[in-house]
Structures are given as structure tokens and as C-alpha cells.
Amino acid sequence: MIKRFVFGKPFDTEAIINKPKQEEGNIPYFEKNGNTFSYEMDDKDIVWGLGENVRGMNKRGHKYTSWCSDEFEHSEEKQSLYGAHNFFIIDGKTKLGGFVDCPGRVDFDIGDTEYSKLYITIENSGFEIYLLEGSSVISIVKEFRQLIGTSYIPPKWAFGIGQSRWGYGSEEDLLKVQEGYRKNNLPVDMIYLDIDYMDNFKDFTVDSNKYRDFKATISKLKEDKIRVIPIIDAGVKVEDGYSVYDEGIKNGFFCKDKEGKEFIVGVWPGKSVLPDFLNKAAARWFGDKYKVLTDMGIEGFWNDMNEPALFYSEKNKQEVFEHLAEYKDTNVGLYANFAMKDAVNLMANNLKDYKSFYHETDKGKICHADVHNLYGYKMTKSASDSLERILGKEKYLLFSRASYIGMHRSSGIWMGDNKSWWSHILLNLKMLPSLNMCGFIYTGADLGGFGSDTTEDLLLRWYALGIFLPLFRNHSCLGSREQEPYQFKAVDKFRGLLNLRYRLLPYLYETFIDSVKNNEMYGSPLGFVWTDDEDAKRCEDQLLIGDSIMIAPVYEQNATGRHVYLPEEMKLIRFKGSEIIEEGIMEAGHNYIHCNLDEICIFLRKNKKLPLAKEAASIEDLDWKDLTYIEY
Ligand code: GLC
């Protein structure tokens, strides 16, 4: 049962596709106080959801802010990452789903201020709240997913192995990665290009000093069944003579300040302007630009910095420098020292800036802060609409960093700039079900960690989770340790795990399609299935993938195994690389499982079977029909 409550005059986010009729009267379950809604939680209530975020699957005990943020440190005290996913389910005696459909800032205080209270505070005056009642968490998820429409499906090759790094600067670099994989007999389907391929970080350009013949390189790699996936950034370089800038200026397609002048910000190219993706004509125009690259043979993209991330705005940069000048000849003590540092640090992604520019929408001029959480969504929708026109439905790969519910129909997302920290394996595992609840099924993390230096053991353990995620990509930051699997001595171990990914793909792909078509979870918390089992409900480091297998990756350094909870009897299948070395029935209950760095333990449920394909060097070589089955 879904109930829709409307407050004020909301901006239509297009998150919901079939809106039920509006309810009259007061909102039930919650006490309303201005724009704050409070709910009394029972001691044992669990709160699932909120999509991409830090902390647990159970969100209780922290504050979260729905505000798409360029956040490069995913630590526990943070409250927002790149996505704004305002869907949650309270799971206790009462089972209740809630979705706050509002493109501005929304705060969730889930038992942080008071352990028994859930507070939701909405900044905009116009918004909608959907309440979903159901007999189980799963049935509420399904109801919600029906409401928001079918999730994005990429082409099959997008389930292969992807290799990325900020710093693959040239054609030579690209071919070196191909060689690294092929020489070492490692399967691969995609190599990603970060901002380095562009001419001075200008979208839809290729640096001709680095690529003699980009199109020829793309086609050469395609002959080897490798797709090249370039990045596109939200900010457009301010440069007379650069056609994207010139056309956008001529047509008034960039966001403007109060006075009606283009709002100048700083991003990778320095001075940049922001395409107004909430203006339909501007969005269509920007989307059409992807053709520059599809004409060169490109079939997939990743959209970045679209929260939008701002290093500074021209206005606030001036103010900061004037402010800093004041300290030049003064005695800088404790408070002045803090103030000086803050002035510089708060220059990026500053709220004052987000309040200083405007969009031209169908509903007239709107301040960016009121619709902030739609920016990445609308950028990515402009791309997917265009790619669908150019390449066709399900024929392109697309994922974005920023997102809002609704964007899940157009593309996937990746989990952003994680770090080579052991705790981030677990963080990424926990994010998967929260994202699936919100419709984001095609997703994955930067395997090995984006920031800081990885190690061989960390990468192996991360792969042990990664091989089960729909999006498999090893990505790292400029300046960090190179982390392609062939950089390590244990290349044989990596080969085994990568081969296993392809062997598992018939199961993983079918699970993916099933979760999209039938609004199922791809990765579920155990508590969604064993609803009366307290230990299962509190288990935050294992996942069901589809309805047949459970995974329990090791996420602690130097551990030779881990605790695994089995809510029911299951069959342990132990792989060493891609080969099975052990099968055995395990009793329900708490167990300790040993698992070496080159091993994967999968737990198969009763009356289920796991199909396994033969190894393949790429998706195109995979035989989806020649399968063996492990049964229980
Ligand atoms: C952002 C992205 C990251 C990318 C970098 C350079 O930090 O999140 O993936 O490598 O920008 O483009």
C-alpha cells in the first residue's frame, strides 16, 4: 500500500514514474513539526536504505545528509557521499518504507541525537513523501522499485573485467595495459580513460599530441575485444574558440548568476562553466556531444564531477585571497590559524556558491541549491537519452558519480573515491544492498582502492568481493601505487580470481537481469531473507547474491579466514582460483572458515544450483551455454 503526501509546491524530480493519487489529511506514523518529521523507533527497529552512504546496512545511530557531495574521504563521521537516495525502510514490529522526494537538502537523524527517534528535516518548502506499507522488507522494496521504474541494463560486455587509472596519459599507456593483460593471460573487456586523454581537460576533445589516431587505436583494441571507456566531466572549460564553450555561450546553455552572467567556477581545466542540465534544450545539446566520441568507436562513458564538484567559484576565490591578505602582517595564533586554513579548505564545494547560481527550467528560474541533488542525474540522463538515440537501448555502458533516484533508469553508478583501506572492502559490501533498494543495480567500487597505495593482499581480497559485483573495475588515483594485477608477483593468483569471474557470469548475469526485471535485490542483507533470525538480521558482512548463493569475503589484513554465520545448512564450495577444490555441507550456525588469498568460498543454498561456464579471455569469448552445475 503506497500513500503519497504533498507539501507546498514541489519541483518534479521525475523520480517516480506512476504517481499514486495524493492523500488528503495528516501524514500517519510521523509527528510533523514545521518541515521536521519525527518517528518513534522501538529498541530493536532496524533502518535500512539511504543508498550510497557511509556506515552500516542498518543506518541507525548516525546523521545523514542528502546532498550530493564530492567527498573523497569516506570515513565514519561523514554524512553525505555523491548520491542523494532518500529511501529507507523501518524494519521492526511495524514495517514501513519512506521516500522523501525532494531535490534540495534533506537531513536524516536516525537515532543519533536520541536513540529512539528518527528525525527527517527538509530544507525546501515543497516536497513529497511516500509511505509504503508492506508485510515484509522485501515486499516494500518491490513496491518502491515498481514506483520508480525499471533499472538500467548495460550491454553484456560491461560485466567483464575493467581496468582504469587516472594517469593513462597516451596511446602508449593504453596499449601497455592491453599488453599487460594479454601477455599475462589475464581476461579483460574494458580499459577506461580518465581526464588525461582530453586536450586540456576539455570535454569531447582528444589530445592529438598523446593520440596520433584515436579512432584507429579504439578500433585496434576492439579487434582484441577490448572497449575503451572515456570519462566526461560536468564542467566546461572557459575558452574562446572551444566549440562546446562557444555554442553553450551563444545559446545561453550554462548556469548563470543572479545578474544573468555565466557563473564561473574552477574545476580541472581551471575556469569553467556548468551546463544547465535542468534546461531541456541545454541537456539535449550536451547529450548530443557524446556523438563526437561514439563516432570514433566509443560505446561507453563514465560521468564525473557532477555533484557538481567545485574547486572554487571566481567570486569566492577573490574573497578568500582578500581575507588571507589580512593575516600577512599579523601575529597568527590559534584561532587565526584555524580561520586561515578554513578559508582555503572551505573554498571547494561551498554552500554559498551553490546558492549563487540558477537554472532555467520549464517552471522558470530556480536557484541551484533548491535542486542541487538533480544535477548529476540530469547530466547523466542527457547522456543516456543521446546514447540510446545513437547506439540503441542496452547498447551502451554508462555510469555516473552523482545521482538521485530516477537516474537508476538511465545508468549505473560507481561508489566513488574510496581508499586502499581494508575497512573500505566492507564499506563497499554494505553499500551494495542499500543501492539495490534504491534501484541502482549496475554498480561497483574502485577495486584495490582509489586513493593511497594498495598492496597485493588487499587487492586480492577486494577482488574476492569485486568478482560478485555487476561493475568490475580496478581504478586508482594519479600518484598512487600502480595496481594493475600484472604489477604484482602474485599474478597467477589474480588470474585465478579473474577467470572465476567469467566462470560465474552466467549466474551473475541472470541474477542481474532478474533483479532488474522483477524488482529483486541483486545483493541482499541476510536479514531480508531470514526475517525472524536475529543473528541474520544483525549480520553486516555477508551478502546473498541472488537467491542461491551467499558470500563472506575476508576484509581484514593478515587474516587467514573469518567468522561466517549460516542461517541454514548450506554447501560450501571452495575455489582455488577458478577451480573447485572442496565441496561440503555445513551445519547452520556460527562457523570459522579458513580462506587463503587465492581462494573464494561460496555458500550454496539447499535446492539451488550454481551454473559455471568455462574460462574466457573476454565476454565475447564466453560460451554461455556450455555450463556445468554444482547442485545442492
Ligand atoms: C574524481 C573521480 C575519479 C577520477 C578523478 C580524475 O576524483 O572520482 O574517479 O579518477 O576525478 O578524473
Image: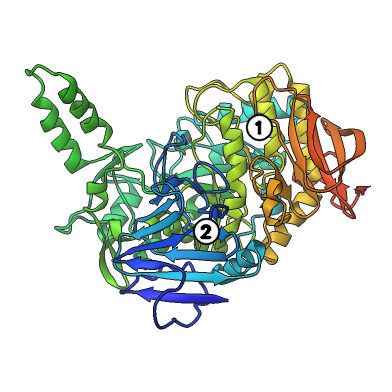
Please report whichever mark, 1 or 2, sits nearer to the chain's N-terminal start. Answer: 2
Residue at (60% x, 29% y) in the render: 448
Residue at (70% x, 31% y) in the render: 554
Q: Which color scheme did the rendering employ for the protein?
A: rainbow
Residue at (55% x, 27% y) in the render: 420
- Image height of 50 relative to 461, above or below: below
In the displayed structure image, the side of residue 207 where residue 431 appears, left or right: right
Kindly check if marks 1 and 2 are in contact, taking CB atoms under 8 A apart as contact: no
Q: Position of residue 334 (x, y in %)?
A: 18, 21
Q: Position of residue 499 (x, y in %)?
A: 79, 35
Q: Looking at the image, can residue 289 be seen?
A: no
Q: Position of residue 550 (x, y in %)?
A: 76, 45
Residue that lies at the very extreme toward the front in this rendered image: 43
Q: Nearer the viewer, residue 191 or 370?
A: 370
- Image height of 169 relative to 15, above or below: above
Q: How many marks?
A: 2
Residue under label 2, please give it: 88
Residue under label 1, please give it: 462
Q: Nearer the viewer, residue 425 or 155?
A: 425
Amino acid type assigned to the residue bearing label 2 in the image: Phe
In the displayed structure image, the side of residue 73 where residue 481 appears, left or right: right
Nearer the camera: disc 1 or disc 2 = 2
Q: Position of residue 70 (x, y in %)?
A: 40, 42
Give how far apart the Cα atoms at labels 1 and 2 are. 27 Å
Amino acid type assigned to the residue bearing label 1 in the image: Trp
Residue 240 placement: quadrant: top left
- Image height of 60 relative to 27, above or below: above
Q: Nearer the viewer, residue 483 or 226?
A: 483
